[in-house]
Amino acid sequence: MRKKLFLIPLILLLLNACGSRQVNTAENSTKIESSEEKTESQNYDKSESKTTMGNTERIEKDFGTFNIPEGWGEAKEQSGHGRYFYVVKGHEHDAMPNNISINMGHQNYNLNESEKFAESTTMQLGMQIKQSGIDATVSGSSGKTDAGDIMYIFDIKINNTDEIDRQYYILRDKKFVMVFMTNFDNDEEVNKAAELMAKSFEWK
């Protein structure tokens, strides 16, 4: 199977030096809310950590460690260049499997400037969606990982489809880890798997 089948639309893959994507346009206004202000469309519940998903496996990469649910595994043929893809086992060669990737990137801000990071990347995502002509609705929220790291969460709902692309950005000074979910049929188990990976992440 070709790698490109795992990738979300090109517009959502474009990252600038800020290292994030989020939206704030006239057509799609995104409010960054705290985890206590969780939006309806976000379906992000900070009380639901990996502990609610049964057995898990701890994964170690150069940039940190995280949990994946039982039944999930790395799609090694699709992973590469510092980005690692995970799918439900047995679906590695599907044409369009629900998938979650994780990678580290670099951004311009220190932790005490995290709001600037959110503002900058929100503007970027908004411009990218507008320029691409994609009909999408974007929502965002903020929270923390189980280890206490700052985390921003953005949902891109492709209108007139069941697809949701969700991005978790876990921040450190001048860098981030992104957990990127592509959920073509809005499967709640996939949503939970992505949340688990993000919330359980710990930097090395």
Image (cartoon, rainbow, N blue to C red):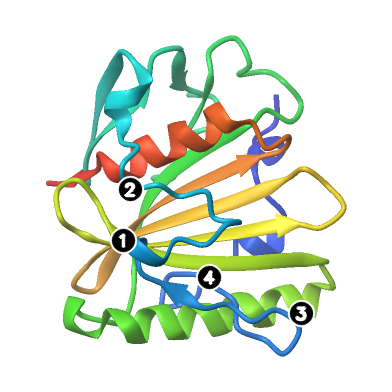
Question: What type is the residue that disc 2 sits on?
Answer: Lys
Please name which of the two marks, 4 or 2, marks the residue nearer to the observer.
2
Q: CA distance from mark 4 to mark 2?
A: 22 Å
Asked if the residue under mark 2 is in contact with the one under mark 1, i.e. CB atoms within 8 Å, the reply is: yes
Q: Which one is closest to the eye, mark 3 or mark 2? A: 2
- The three-letter code of the residue at mark 4 reads Arg
Label 3 sits on what residue type?
Lys
Disc 1 versus disc 4: nearer the observer: 1
Residue 21 got which mark?
4
Packing grade of label 3 (10 A; few <14, some 14-19, many >=20) is: some
Q: What number of labels is visible?
A: 4
Which class describes the residues within 10 Å of circle 1: few (<14), some (14-19), or many (20+)? Answer: many
Residue 130's mark?
A: 3
- Residue 80 visible, this orientation: no
State the residue position of label 2: 46
Q: Nearer the viewer, residue 43 or 112?
A: 43
In this rendering, is residue 116 above or below 170?
below
Residue count near mark 2 (Cα–Cα under 10 Å), binned few <14, some 14–19, many ≥20: some
Residue 71 at what x, y percent from top left?
Answer: 45, 12
Q: SS at mark 2? A: loop
Residue 73, quarter of picture: top left
Give the mark nearer the N terminus: 1 vs 4: 4
For the residue carrying disc 4, how many other residues have a C-alpha within 10 Å: few (<14), some (14-19), or many (20+)? many
